[in-house]
Amino acid sequence: MITNLESNLEPKDGASVEDDKELNKEQEDVPSGVPDAHQGGISSKLDHAEVEIQDSSGGDTKGDSTQEEESFDVVAEPGQSTGAVSLLVIMDGPVQASHSETIEESFDDRLVSEERSLEDSERPKISSEAEFASGVDSESNNLPVKISEPSFLLSSGAALLPHPAKALTGGEDAYFLACKNWFGVADGVGQWSLEGINAGLYAKELMENCERLLSESLNGSGTKPDQIINRSAVDAISPGSSTVLVAYFDGQVLHVANIGDSGFIIIRNGKVYNKSSPMVYGFNFPLQIQRGDDPSKLIQEYNMALDEGDVVVTATDGLFDNIYEEEIAAIVSKSLQASLKPSEIAELLALRAQEVGKSTGRSPFADAANAAGYTAFTGGKLDDVTVIVSIVQKSNT
């Protein structure tokens, strides 16, 4: 999908580079001639850029929404129960009232009663489908019964491996795990290091703010991931820019808000079931936010129903640039068979990603470079790697 950039996507003065200056390379891993805009910040070339959301085959996102229950109030008319609609009973003879007073009913009165009875009988009855949705038993006066759905939780673990050259500073990636079912990742833009700024500070502050905001809001109750990103960005004071992803699992549906080329894949029965799409301006140039930006203009949201046994792998681009989705699914499946913990699976994936990053073989990053016209490029892309593995399990409550 190609969307023309609006003015709000123009480069910020604090992070732009001269038009006549090529993007500086931070590592030797990406050879000259291959633009490393992920490391290069927001370029002034964005004036005429286009936002490209890459969508691989089989990666259609599915938005699942929960249906709200509808309740129906059955109003009782004279002669009706609050359950099924019943006909009035017409007596041929007199009806005994209290105090033994006899009320004579005329022929005209009986006609009126019969007409009223027919009108009541013609009223539409609550359909069986609606009764099922609301839990109302139309054949009795029972109170509505809520139909419960199974509730799940996430068992999550994470691993972060910095680029070997950035190990002393801890790298430029960051993540958080909070309140059992909340998590997020961020990837700082390396170009800031050329200005003497630790490029990971802004990403780390975003994740710290997310965790703090959730702890202050009763474990994130009633809060959406996009709101957490927006508030976290408002509170951030560090210089820099970053991609960011925040997700929340409500027991049925995974809600994700994303900006940039970090992402997730959902593995079901050993296969890739669903996944996100990278948000980029062009090859190796992801969308990102910096201090003072309004993230709400860039956020892409996902809502997907999960089932017991599903595995969600969330990571920065250091994983997806180096390992194909099918290999990720295979590593996860073998690890589950070996009863490895989520944190152990995350570490295996991160180690494998850096192994490929040092190699000269085929990789998703090399495929993308070749497709963008850099046909001489081979191998992986050595980078910081952050991986969160979340396994969907039954809740004990």
Image: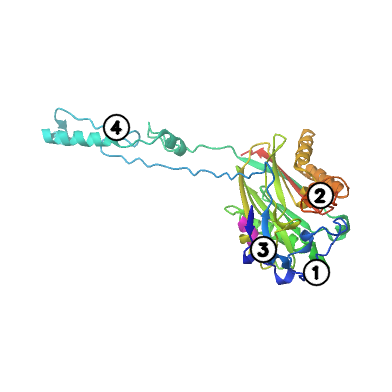
Q: Name which of mark 2 and mark 3 comes first in the sequence.
A: 3
Local packing at callout 2 (Cα closer than 10 Å; few below 14, some 14-19, many 20+) is: many
Q: Name which of mark 2 and mark 1 comes first in the sequence.
A: 1
Residue carrying label 1 = 21
212 inside magenta stretch? no
The amino acid pointed to by label 4 is Ser
Marks 4/1: CA distance? 84 Å
Q: Which residues are magenta?
A: 226-234
Q: What residue sits 81% from the left and 49% below the top? A: 366
Query: What percent of the width, then of the height, locates residue 33?
Result: 84, 59
Query: What percent of the width, then of the height, locates residue 170?
Result: 83, 58
Residue carrying label 4 = 86
Q: Is residue 198 visible?
A: no
Marks 2/4: CA distance? 74 Å
Left or right side of 54 for 109:
left
230 inside magenta stretch? yes
Q: What residue sits 24% from the left and 32% below the top? A: 88
Left or right side of 200 for 266:
left
- Looking at the image, do the residues carrying marks 2 and 4 touch, with CB atoms under 8 Å apart? no
**Residue nearer the viewer, 116 or 48:** 48
Residue carrying label 2 = 366
Q: Name which of mark 3 and mark 4 comes first in the sequence.
A: 4
Query: What percent of the width, then of the height, locates residue 100?
Result: 14, 33
- Looking at the image, do the residues carrying marks 1 and 3 touch, with CB atoms under 8 Å apart? no
Note whether 295 is above or below 302 in the view shown.
Answer: below
Marks 2/3: CA distance? 33 Å
| Mark 1 vs mark 3: in front | 1
